């Protein structure tokens, strides 16, 4: 663990004791970081994505460091039947689910006029449709069982500002933001809380390669847009997520917490600087993105 205070665990031990938490997109990146911390705080965990081999590897890794159980479930969240099966398997294993973290996402940079409708659909289906499929499936179960619960949605700061060159993601995240705030009011009477986190730049290998492929990160260093002068540490986001799914935050409902070092205040739209990319460079970027997606 880093000796930096902001990169250390925040909550006391057993803060999530007895809870069962589901994270979509939980096999890698920020989903994995959140899941690992949740189990350290006493929660049992369900992680879901389309890649079972990745999930199983992550489950083994997380279970080695804790006495908690981790259930990996292969699930395409854009398929409602598979999401219902995810609920079924979760209940068979743990008997309940206390919190849903809608973390699964997809994104890539491109001028919008270069996108096919299929490319647009891929992002919107994962980010928006996948989120409301999961939310409806688990929410209806909680309401039927009269079980208090919480939902944490991972959005982004351009959900409310928009951003050039990531339009499908901006559209989908804006929808998730509206879903968060709408159901925070509508379903509070059932004891179901909704909150969201809007992260800034938290480098992960997969996302970094899709959004800043090749040597574009050297030409357009995003850190210069962040007032605190650095990107985020995964533990910082995990600390915030753990607090928002814990009972310590029981009076927080419908809130979106930005954790970006002041980036969006400095310049709305994380990718607006790509206006500086010349046309010929977009051809190179497209090739780099396709190579990453094809792996």
Image (cartoon, rainbow, N blue to C red):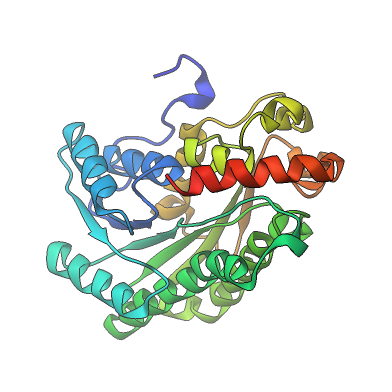
Residue found farthest to the top: 3
Q: Position of residue 283 (x, y in %)?
A: 71, 45
Left or right, 263 with reference to 108 = right
Q: Residue 11 versus residue 21: which sits nearer the camera?
A: 21
Q: Position of residue 104 (x, y in %)?
A: 45, 57
Q: Is residue 43 visible?
A: no
Q: Quadrant of residue 57?
A: top left
Left or right, 282 with reference to 11 = right
Number of dots carrying numbers? 0
Give me the residue at 47% from left, 80% from top.
Answer: 189
Residue found farthest to the bottom: 144
Q: Position of residue 193 (x, y in %)?
A: 47, 67
Q: Quadrant of residue 148?
A: bottom left
Q: Is residue 48 visible?
A: yes
Give me the residue at 48% from left, 53% from top.
Answer: 249
Q: Is residue 93 above or below residue 262?
A: below
Q: Quadrant of residue 89?
A: bottom left
Q: The C terminus is located in which quarter?
A: top left
Give me the residue at 21% from left, 31% from top.
Answer: 65
Give me the residue at 53% from left, 64% from top.
Answer: 127
Q: Residue 182 versus residue 218: which sits nearer the camera?
A: 218
Q: The N terminus is located in which quarter?
A: top left
Q: Is residue 68 above or below residue 127?
A: above
Q: Is residue 101 above or below residue 88?
A: above
């Amino acid at each position: 663990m880093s000796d930096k205070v902001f990169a250390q665990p925040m909550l006391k031990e057993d803060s999530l004791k007895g809870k069962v938490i589901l994270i979509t997109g939980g096999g890698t990146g920020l989903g994995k970081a959140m899941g690992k911390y949740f189990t350290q705080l006493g929660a049992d965990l369900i992680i879901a994505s389309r890649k079972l081999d990745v999930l199983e590897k992550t489950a083994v890794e997380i279970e080695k460091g804790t006495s908690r159980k981790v259930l990996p479930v292969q699930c395409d969240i854009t398929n409602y039947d598979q999401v219902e099966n995810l609920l079924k398997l979760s209940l068979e294993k743990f008997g309940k689910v206390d919190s849903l973290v809608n973390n699964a996402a997809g994104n890539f940079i491109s001028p919008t006029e270069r996108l096919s409708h299929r490319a647009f659909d891929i992002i919107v289906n994962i980010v928006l449709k996948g989120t409301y499929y999961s939310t409806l499936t688990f929410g209806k179960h909680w309401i039927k069982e009269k079980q208090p619960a919480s939902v944490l949605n991972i959005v982004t700061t351009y959900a409310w500002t928009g951003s050039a060159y990531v339009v499908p993601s901006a559209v989908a995240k804006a929808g998730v933001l509206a879903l968060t705030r709408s159901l925070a009011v509508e379903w509070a009477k059932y004891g179901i809380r909704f909150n969201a986190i809007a992260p800034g730049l938290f480098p992960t290998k997969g996302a970094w390669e899709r959004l800043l492929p090749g040597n574009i990160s050297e030409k357009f260093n995003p850190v210069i847009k962040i007032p605190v002068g650095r990107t985020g540490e995964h533990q910082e986001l995990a600390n915030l997520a753990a607090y928002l799914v814990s009972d310590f935050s029981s009076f927080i409902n419908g809130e979106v917490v930005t954790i970006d070092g002041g980036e969006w205040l400095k310049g709305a739209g994380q990718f607006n600087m790509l206006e500086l990319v010349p046309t010929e460079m977009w051809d190179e970027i497209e090739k780099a993105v396709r190579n990453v997606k094809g792996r």
